[in-house]
Image (cartoon, rainbow, N blue to C red):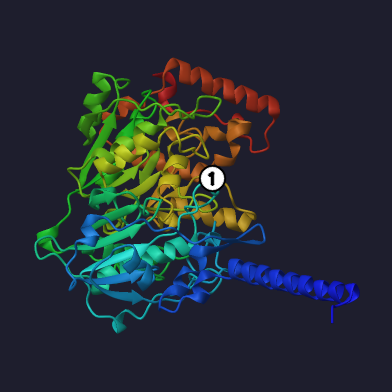
Amino acid sequence: MKPSNSDSTTKSHVVRNIHIAFLLLVLVATITLYIQPVYLFQNNSGTKDLRKAENRIVNGKTKVGKIAIEKAPGFLAGLDEKTRIGLVNLPYDDAKSCGINGSLTVVDFDVVSNDITWNDLYPSWIDEEGESGSHPTCPTIPMPDFSAFNDIDLVVAQLPCWRPEAGWNRDVFRLQVHLVAANLAVKKGKRNKINGAVKLVFTSRCEPMRDLFRCDDLVKKDGTWWMYEVDVMRLEDKVRSPPGTCELISPLLDEGPNKGFDAGKFKPLPSHRRQREAYVTVLHSSDTYVCGAITLAHSIRKVGSTRDLVLLHDEFINPTQLRFLGNAGWSLRQIERIHNPHPRSDRLYEYSYSKFHIFQLTEYDKIVFLDADIMVLRNLDMLFNFPSISARGDHDELFNAGIMVVEPSNCTFKTFMLNINSVKSYDGGDQGFLNEMFVWWHRLPRRTNFFKMIWANTTKEKLKFDSMFVADPPQLYAIHYFGLKPWMCYRDYDCNWDLETVRGFANDEAHWRWWRVYDGMDEGLKKMCRLSIKQKRNLNHFRLQASKMRYSDGHWKWNITDPRKDI
């Protein structure tokens, strides 16, 4: 019997509905596969470590995308099958599929919580001295149980790279992968019998963090593959540090007001590996800081340090001034100024990148850089035991470049020059540039680089800071003089009081402390601290303006007794 037209129409609707349902099922399945993390569909161990590498929360939305791994280069593909390799953030199947040969062990670890941000690791301020009753602690960045693994010949790690996203180089998970790889190399890595080096290979579009892995230690590079041979003792010093500036690199001992470093955490190298060390400063573009540099050298020697003193200078320092600087104890090195392609609009810091020449002092293993407007009150030699870059905090997640522990490196200097046009400094100067090049730095106590500025909210706080400036024996290791420098003022009082723009830097106690150190210098050296006719004219003008403003502090009324006034 021939079917009716109505039966045909009904069957046609049924078939169409089945097709639509099937298409919807396929579509739902496809979307589900797309939005789910890849690691949920992999069976090998270690894939949970890719959670953040493949899924990111950006502006409240999940960003998905599996990292593409390039084929392994010859120095990995050609390894013997017996080579013991520890895989960090790199699943077993992915390692095999890209051509890595050897005996592979996946190093599994719990991914750091999304709730921990870079600001948690690098807070603007911490209670360094436990004035609140407790000392600051850092958030936990999970590490594997390294005791569960056998020794390995090589670490291979996959690093996430979010460039060019803003803040890509300050990513907590990226730091975690670096730290897992570094700790694995230190604790389980096979050490070269001659130089004690361990081997690590990274795959990433982005260069591994130069804070941990110096370009000096890069021995091979092929596409997105980077191979390092790293001095294990240097790396051990690094991983022994806190994961951020949420804690001090070395806590201060609590006995009394004259707090000192706890030397137990970072011990000097054995005698057969003794470092070559120096204090370094830089003068460029004018002779304004010659007096400051002479006083700085005197202050370093006065506290008992015998480390080398090295001063880098350009052609703006004349032969007479160089002779006095040499007499003060500085070993002199002439440099060519480095022009800053992105100075501030007022041309301040136009040649501040000249400071980068300190990285070329490779005859030294480690240096402590000090700006020439710093005065040392207590021996700072302990700083040479700390890793590069160690410095005090400035603001936000940034360090102050006035005092820094640095490992010189021609390779690092060349990296600076290659990036000088592309890296933008937040302050238009060297400090901003260095903070972009070294994001994983270590916090020194503020007493090592104590800012001369008024931040006290109460009279009690101001009296406390004033007492620290004048304390004898000293409570501070060094004072950093902001604004107009002591030698630019009459010794009677801090001339920052007379200028509205710098009154926040005025402090008579810190000013007088500088002059006490000056008084102990050789009389011949003091000639470099005389005031020029122009400087005296400016000081008198500042006093006149302050008198017109009738500033309540009344310094403009003081009688000037500084003998330099009449020289």
Position of residue 259 relative to residue 412, above or below, is below
- Could you tell me residue 248's position as x and y percent? 42, 63
- Judge by depth and name the residue closer to the eye, 104 or 255: 104
Q: Is residue 552 left or right of residue 234?
A: right
Which residue: 46% across, 38% down? Answer: 423
Position of residue 378 relative to residue 338, above or below, is below
Which residue: 63% across, 35% down? Answer: 554
**What residue is pinned by disc 1?**
453
State the residue lying farthest toward the front: 1
- Judge by depth and name the residue closer to the eye, 40 or 367: 40
Amino acid type of the residue tagged 1 in the rendering: Met
Q: Is residue 254 left or right of residue 72?
A: right
Label 1, residues with CA under 10 Å away: few <14, some 14-19, many ≥20: some
- Residue 7 visible in the shown view: yes
- Could you tell me residue 511's position as x and y percent? 46, 40
- Could you tell me residue 542's position as x and y percent? 58, 24
- Residue 378 visible in the shown view: no
Position of residue 91 relative to residue 497, above or below, is below
Position of residue 196 relative to residue 133, above or below, is above
Instruction: Determine which quarter of the picture holds residue 420.
Output: top left
- Could you tell me residue 458's position as x and y percent? 64, 55
Mark 1 falls on what kind of element? loop
- Judge by depth and name the residue closer to the eye, 277 or 558: 277
The C terminus sits in image quarter:
top left
Instruction: Determine which quarter of the picture holds residue 31.
Output: bottom right
- Judge by depth and name the residue closer to the eye, 214 or 4: 4
The N terminus sits in image quarter:
bottom right
Which residue: 23% across, 34% down? Answer: 328
